[in-house]
């Protein structure tokens, strides 16, 4: 039997990091089993679907390493509405489902507001189909439904506690529970790997598989992803969109490695490992079922490690979208013709060790490309204290006299200028740095001045001096 798994996102506007994690787990499992990965877009909620959101899913998957063309699909759930209706009809005709005309108020009037679920009032009323009548599944009164789950063992549900749930609404449209089962069935899905939040649906879905006469799949409900307060990551509260991480400059390799650590770890005391190791070692039955903490700080540190591990040429290439802007990344503050690739290449290795996400490249190098540096006023106030004007005067004179404009000579010169005033190098650097780069922190100063060049450095020092008058 060929293993067939599916990733079945609903296009809801952004691609949740938890979804990306499930997609990767499906992807790896399929690969390990010599199986097939199917992408199915669950787009039946027409009001909440837009084609660009589907495109967003495809491109986010692509970014994370699940490339278009290397999987089956995308299929669209909305194309199978006929099959969903036919299955509902079959269940009705076989006596496994019945029509019900109760409103929520009717049910509550009978059961009281505390009781949850449907009371079975219409079970034996023999109602036929009709406008406003929902179709409910007749759950067995006895027995248990045992779910075989690779992550959770065998969660067992007593059938008598499962209400007669709706499978088609009053307008005849089948609900998610049924559509999802019918599609999995017709697509020959053997393993359903998805988020824990669907576990409560699973006994109902398994009953539908049984009622439709097909052996249910093996399930794997992977842990919910939570924030530092142990709350489920939510798009209203937390940064959950994979695209947001991508556009901030997380590397796809770092991101997918980190996502796979949510509830699982490779052998040994390792966290950062080659993707091939994860592909080889990952086991669903080793996934910890408890909620997995999505630690953004850790991810950031992780990403910094990945950035530092890049060959410099790859780092230069990886920075490009932030140096030019794209349709989702804001353009940098300089004009395209102000960008100087050679100057960037000259400082790239220095920047590479200092940033944790690629978007941070921009404030580190903007002084090289802008005609005038962007002055951070707080930094200016801090650095341009008493004595700054005299120090800048002396530095200008000393720099003008330099024969060779290189980092070492610049450093020795400013060191001497500072020493004459009883200042350590750090203190002497501050006004120069702010005058030239606009900031108090940044790339090593003398290498920066070297790359910026004599004329531009002196122009900026003089401009700062004028401002101090
Ligand atoms: N479309 C469902 C969701 O986005 C997934 C259902 C499933 O994986 O079975 O949550």
Image: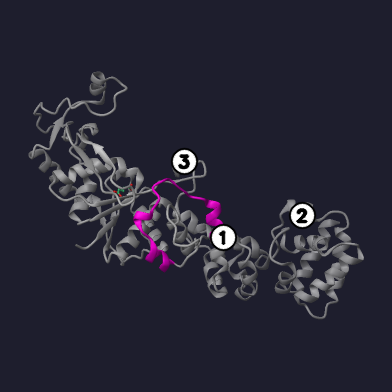
Q: CA distance from mark 2 to mark 3?
A: 41 Å
- The answer to whether residue 12 is visible is yes
> Which region is colored magenta?
275-302
Q: Residue 38 in the image: state x and y as whole percent.
A: 27, 59
Nearer the observer, 360 or 155? 155
Q: CA distance from mark 2 to mark 1?
A: 24 Å
- Locate the N terminus and report the quarter of the image it occupies: bottom left
Q: Which residue is mark 1?
A: 359
Q: Name the side, left or right, on which 47 lies relative to 380.
A: left
Q: Which residue is mark 2?
A: 380
Please tell me which residue is depicted at 44% across the width and 61% down the height of the picture.
Answer: 266
Q: Residues within 10 Å of mark 3 (few under 14, many from 20)?
A: some
* Residue 45 falls within the magenta-colored stretch: no
Asked if 393 appears above or below 208 in the picture, the reply is below
Q: Earlier in the sequence, mark 2 or mark 3?
A: 3
Nearer the observer, 137 or 326? 137
Q: Which residue is mark 3?
A: 231
* Residue 293 falls within the magenta-colored stretch: yes
Q: Is mark 2 within 8 Å of ligand 1?
A: no
């Amino acid at each position: 039997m060929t293993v067939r798994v599916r990733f079945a996102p609903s296009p809801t506007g952004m691609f949740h990091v938890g979804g990306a994690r499930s997609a990767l787990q499906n992807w790896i499992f399929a690969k390990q089993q010599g199986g097939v990965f199917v992408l199915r877009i669950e787009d039946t909620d027409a009001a909440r679907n837009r084609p660009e959101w589907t495109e967003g899913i495809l491109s986010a998957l692509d970014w994370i390493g699940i490339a278009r063309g290397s999987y089956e699909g995308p299929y669209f759930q909305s194309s199978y509405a006929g099959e969903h209706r036919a299955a509902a009809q079959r269940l009705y005709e076989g006596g496994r489902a019945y029509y019900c005309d109760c409103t929520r108020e009717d049910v509550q009037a009978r059961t009281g507001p505390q009781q949850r679920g449907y009371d079975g009032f219409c079970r034996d009323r023999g109602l036929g189909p009709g406008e406003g009548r929902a179709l409910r599944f007749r759950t067995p009164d006895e027995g248990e439904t045992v779910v075989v789950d690779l992550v959770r063992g065998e969660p067992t549900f007593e059938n008598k506690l499962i209400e007669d749930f709706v499978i088609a609404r009053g307008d005849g449209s089948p609900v998610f529970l049924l559509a999802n089962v019918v599609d999995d069935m017709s697509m020959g899905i053997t393993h359903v790997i998805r988020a824990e939040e669907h576990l409560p649906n699973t006994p109902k879905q398994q009953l539908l598989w049984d009622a439709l006469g097909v052996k249910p799949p093996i399930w794997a409900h992977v842990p919910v992803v939570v924030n530092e307060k142990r709350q489920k990551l939510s798009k209203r509260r937390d940064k959950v969109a994979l695209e947001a991480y991508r556009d901030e400059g997380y590397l796809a390799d770092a991101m997918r490695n980190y996502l796979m650590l949510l509830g699982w770890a490779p052998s040994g005391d390792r966290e950062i490992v080659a993707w091939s190791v994860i592909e080889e070692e990952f086991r669903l039955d080793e996934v910890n079922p408890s909620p997995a903490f999505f630690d953004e700080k850790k991810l950031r540190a992780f990403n910094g490690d990945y950035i530092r591990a890049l060959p410099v040429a790859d780092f230069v290439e990886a920075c490009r979208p932030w140096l030019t802007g794209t349709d989702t990344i804001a353009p940098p503050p300089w004009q395209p013709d102000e960008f100087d690739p050679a100057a960037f290449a000259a400082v790239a290795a220095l920047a590479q060790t200092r940033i944790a996400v690629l978007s941070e490249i921009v404030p580190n190098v903007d002084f090289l490309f802008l005609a005038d540096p962007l002055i951070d006023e707080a930094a200016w106030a801090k650095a341009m204290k008493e004595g700054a004007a005299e120090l800048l005067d002396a530095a200008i004179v000393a720099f003008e006299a330099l024969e060779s404009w290189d980092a070492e000579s610049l450093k020795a010169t400013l060191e001497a200028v500072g020493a004459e005033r009883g200042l350590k190098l750090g203190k002497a650097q501050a006004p120069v740095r702010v005058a030239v780069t606009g900031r108090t922190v940044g790339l090593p100063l003398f290498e920066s001045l070297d790359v910026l060049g004599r004329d531009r450095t002196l122009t900026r020092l003089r401009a700062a001096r004028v401002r101090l008058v």
